[in-house]
Image: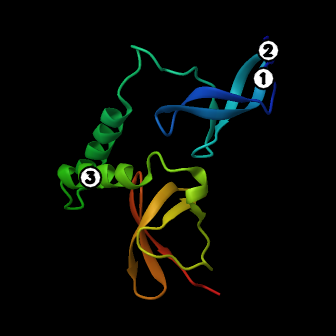
Amino acid sequence: MTAKPLAAGSEIDAWCTRCRLDLGHRIVAMVDKRPKRVICLTCNTEHNYRPPRSGPVAREPRAATAERATRRASSEGSGHSSRSALRQLADWEAHVVGQAVGAFTHYSVDKEYEPGQLVLHRRFGEGYVVERVGTDKITVLFRDGPRVLVQGQR
């Protein structure tokens, strides 16, 4: 069986520069029969194509992500310790990583959400509702940290 030739619109495995994982991507642009630009099917980020890093050369994605979370927490000076940032990242991974795409609800200000519900935000990516803040706000934990979002705005 011969492999189907690559073309714009085809799906391909690639290294996602945002997710820091080998994931499925859709090819956006080709140059000389090679993928040039791709869109991650997980986080919807468009970036230059990078071949998958699977194998012995690949870095451990969680270590890199945890290191960034630690640096961000210490540079923000917000009073949160690096342990807090690492705990948040571990909490996010426990709730979100490995979930089916269909398990996520696309975020919209007019919808209402419950704690524990998985949310897909077009800018912040995948997250889950940590708590309701009053009747019109929710705290959602995303990979890069918690965000307060509005809900139920009709």
Q: Of the two numbered discs 3 and 1 on the same chain, state the one appearing first in sequence.
A: 1
Position of residue 93 relative to residue 62, above or below, is below
Foreground residue, 37 or 115? 115
**Which corner quadrant of the image does residue 79 belong to?**
bottom left
Which residue occupies 77% across, 30% down? Answer: 10
Residue with the mark numbered 1: 30
Rounded to the nearest angstrom, the CA distance separating label 1 from label 2 is 6 Å
Q: Amino acid at mark 1?
A: Met
**Which corner quadrant of the image does residue 71 belong to?**
top left
User: Considering the numbered disc 3 on the image, is that residue within a helix, a strand or a loop?
Assistant: helix
Residue with the mark numbered 3: 85
Which residue occupies 46% across, 58% down? Answer: 127
Q: Position of residue 55 (x, y in %)?
A: 44, 15
User: Considering the numbered disc 2 on the image, is that residue within a helix, a strand or a loop?
Assistant: loop
How many other residues sit within 10 Å of disc 2, few (<14), some (14-19) or many (≥20)?
few
Q: Which mark is residue 33?
A: 2
Q: Which mark is residue 41?
A: none
Q: Amino acid at mark 2?
A: Lys
Is there CB contact under 8 Å for labels 3 and 2? no
Is there CB contact under 8 Å for labels 1 and 2? yes
Which residue occupies 56% across, 33% down? Answer: 23
Q: How is the model colour-coded?
A: rainbow
Q: Amino acid at mark 3?
A: Ala
Rounded to the nearest angstrom, the CA distance separating label 3 from label 2 is 42 Å
Position of residue 58 relative to residue 26, above or below, is above
Position of residue 129 relative to residue 65, above or below, is below
How many other residues sit within 10 Å of disc 3, few (<14), some (14-19) or many (≥20)?
many
